[in-house]
Image (cartoon, rainbow, N blue to C red):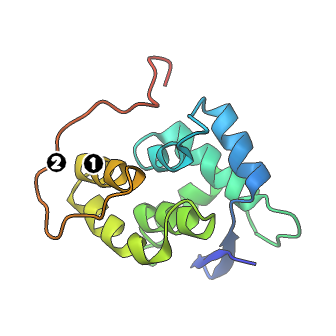
């Protein structure tokens, strides 16, 4: 079983996006189920979606997580300087859920560090079935297809 494991405050946290939890997250956030990677990556920039995603990933069957709700986990991660970066967590969850290839995660993490515009451009490139450009700095700013006025 694939889980994304890390410690917060000395306690082991194991996150996993099961198919059922992922589907429920996509429905709850009104994300496009035809492009679930976009819905998951929206959690990088949208706090409400981040809380929902973390809550979904905490609640897999048989888990022994010390947290039940995403907001509790996020608060403690913010207080723990050794906690992983949120971009790493979200991309790790996406890879473990099979939404992106594990060997693509490193490039996506680097893109995330450069900014969400470049990341979204790279994700669109991957969804189009094209390879990521080496060292590409320029990304076209495009509206987020899953954002609504209610978000």
Of the residues under marks 2 and 1, which one precedes in the sequence? 1
Residue 69 is at least partly visible in this image: no
Q: Nearer the viewer, residue 59 or 80?
A: 59
At 40% across and 44% down in the image, what residue appears?
45
Task: Please determine whether, in this image, residue 28 is positioned above or below residue 98.
Answer: above
Q: Viewed as shown, does residue 42 lie left or right of 3? A: left
Q: Is residue 69 above or below residue 46?
A: below
Residue at position x 46%, y 50% in the image:
41
Q: Which mark is residue 139?
A: 2
Considering the image in quadrants, where does the N terminus appear? bottom right
On screen, residue 143 versus residue 25, left or right, reads left
**Residue 140 in picture, x, y percent from top left:** 17, 41
**In the image as oriented, which residue stretches furthest toward the front?**
129
Give the residue furthest to the left. Answer: 138
From this view, report whether residue 96 is shown above or below residue 149.
below
Residue 11: x, y in percent? Answer: 67, 79
Q: Position of residue 59 (x, y in %)?
A: 78, 58
For the residue pair 139 and 49, the one nearer the viewer reads as 139
* Residue located beneath label 1 in the image: 121
Residue 52: image x %, image y %? Answer: 63, 44
Q: Residues within 10 Å of mark 1 (few under 14, many from 20)?
A: some
Rounded to the nearest whole Å, what is the CA distance between mark 2 and mark 1?
A: 6 Å
Instruction: Identify the secondary structure beneath mark 2.
Output: loop
Give the SS element for disc 1. helix
* Residue reaching furthest to the top: 149
Q: Residue at x 74, y 55 (%)?
A: 19
Q: Quadrant of residue 113?
A: bottom left
Q: Residues within 10 Å of mark 2 (few under 14, many from 20)?
A: some
Q: Are marks 2 and 1 in contact (CB under 8 Å)?
A: yes
Residue at 82 percent across and 73 percent down: it is 64
Tag of residue 71: none
């Amino acid at each position: 079983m694939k889980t994304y494991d890390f410690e917060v405050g000395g306690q082991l946290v194991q996150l996993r996006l099961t198919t059922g939890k992922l589907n429920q997250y996509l429905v709850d956030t009104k994300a496009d189920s035809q492009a679930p990677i976009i819905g998951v990556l929206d959690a990088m920039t949208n706090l409400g979606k981040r809380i929902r995603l973390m809550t979904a990933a905490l609640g897999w069957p048989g888990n022994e997580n010390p947290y039940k709700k995403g907001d509790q986990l996020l608060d403690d991660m913010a207080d723990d300087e050794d906690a992983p970066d949120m971009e790493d967590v979200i991309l790790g969850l996406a890879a473990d859920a099979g939404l992106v290839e594990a060997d693509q995660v490193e490039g996506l993490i680097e893109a995330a560090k450069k900014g969400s515009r470049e990341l979204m451009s790279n994700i669109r490139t991957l969804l189009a079935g094209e390879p990521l450009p080496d060292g590409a700095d320029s990304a076209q700013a495009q509206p987020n297809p899953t954002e609504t006025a209610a978000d």
